[in-house]
Amino acid sequence: MIIREFIGVDVGGTKIHAGLIKDGQVVKELRVPTEAHRSREEIVADLETGISELMTDKVAGIGVGVPGLVDLEAGVIRNVSNIPAWKNFPVKELLESRFNIPVYIGNDANCFALGEYYFGKGKGFSHLVALALGTGVGAGLIVNKQLLIGNGSLAGEFGGIKHLDSSFEDYCSGKFFRNNYHTEGVDLAQQAAAGEVSALKIFHEFGVHVGHLIEAIMYAVGPEAIIIGGSLSKAFPYFEPGLKEFLSKFAHQEALATTLIEVSGNPGIPLLGAGALVLSAEPESVLIH
C-alpha cells in the first residue's frame, strides 16, 4: 500500500510555504513572500503559481493551513492573522476550480496535530494533543484517532481558559515575557543559554505556568502524548525544570508517567500537517492498493 502524493501549503503573514509530499516526506518545496498588504488577487496568483510548480498527475489533493479562523464546511477562510485581504476568502472553491482536485483548509494548530499524528512523534497514539506555544497558545486535538474540531472550532482553544488574573494565553506565550518582563522570549532564551541566572529564573516561572496548562489538558483530554511546538518550544530546556516541578505535584502520577511530553522534532511538520488534511478527510482516496 503506497500513499499517493499531495500538496501542503502553510500560509503565514510573511511567507507562503508549499511542498510536494510523497510517502510521508517533503520531496519538493518553495517559499514566496506573502506581502500581506497586497490585494487578494495578487496573493492568490502567487499561491496558484507555486502550487502549479509542485503539481503532478499523482497529486490526490491539496491541504492549506492558516493561522486564523476557518469555516471548514464552506471551505472559507474567515480571518487570517496579518493578511487582511483574505478575510472571508473562499479558498477551497477557488483552488478546486483551478486544479480540479479536492482542497481542504484547516487551522494551523489542527494541522500541527495531524502532522504529528501521521508523520511525527504522535504516530501510533489514539489520543494526542499538539500544543503550540508562540505568539499565542493553540492546540490541535486527536481523540480516538480523529481530529476533534468541536462546535465553532473551539476544541483545543486552551489559551482562552482563565488562569490567575487573566488567561493561559497571557501566561504561556510570548505575551508573558513582554507583559511581565518587557522582553522577548527569543532574547531571554539567548541569555538563558549563556547561563544568566535571572533569565533562567524567568523561564522557570514560565514553566510553572505551562505546567498549569498541561494539568488542565490532562484533565480535559487525558492524552497519551502532548507534543510541544511553536517558537517557544526551542526554549524547552530552560522552562522544562519549572514544568516538571509543578507536574511533580499532579494528583495522578500514574497517568502522567504514561503520557509522552516532548518537543516536536520535525521542522517539516507545518507542511506535512497541511497536506495531512487530505489524509484526514479522505484516507482511502490517497491510497494505492
Image (tube, helix red, strand yellow):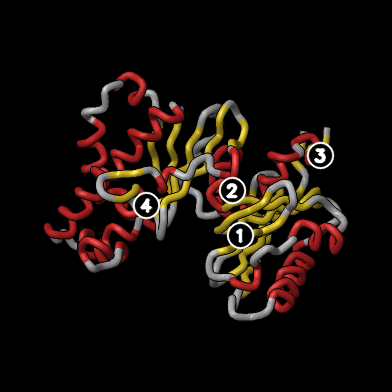
The residue that label 2 is drawn on is 111
**Can I make out residue 34 in this image?**
yes
Mark 3 is surrounded, within 10 Å at the Cα level, by few (under 14), some (14 to 19) or many (20 or more) other residues, namely some
User: Which label lies toward us, 2 or 3?
Assistant: 2
Percent of width and height locating residue 87:
64, 66
Percent of width and height locating residue 261:
38, 36
Q: Is mark 1 on a helix, strand or loop?
A: strand
The residue that label 1 is drawn on is 10
Percent of width and height locating residue 287:
79, 37
The CA span between labels 2 and 3 is 19 Å
Q: Quick check: marks 4 and 2 in contact, CB under 8 Å?
A: no
User: Which label lies toward us, 4 or 2?
Assistant: 4
- In the picture, the disc for residue 169 is 4
Q: For the residue marked with disc 3, what is the amino acid?
A: Ser
- In the picture, the disc for residue 166 is none
Residue that lies at the very extreme toward the top in this rendered image: 254
Marked residue nearer the N-terminal end (2 or 3): 2
Identity of the residue drawn at 68% across and 46% down: 277
Marked residue nearer the N-terminal end (1 or 3): 1
Q: Is mark 2 on a helix, strand or loop?
A: helix
Mark 1 is surrounded, within 10 Å at the Cα level, by few (under 14), some (14 to 19) or many (20 or more) other residues, namely many
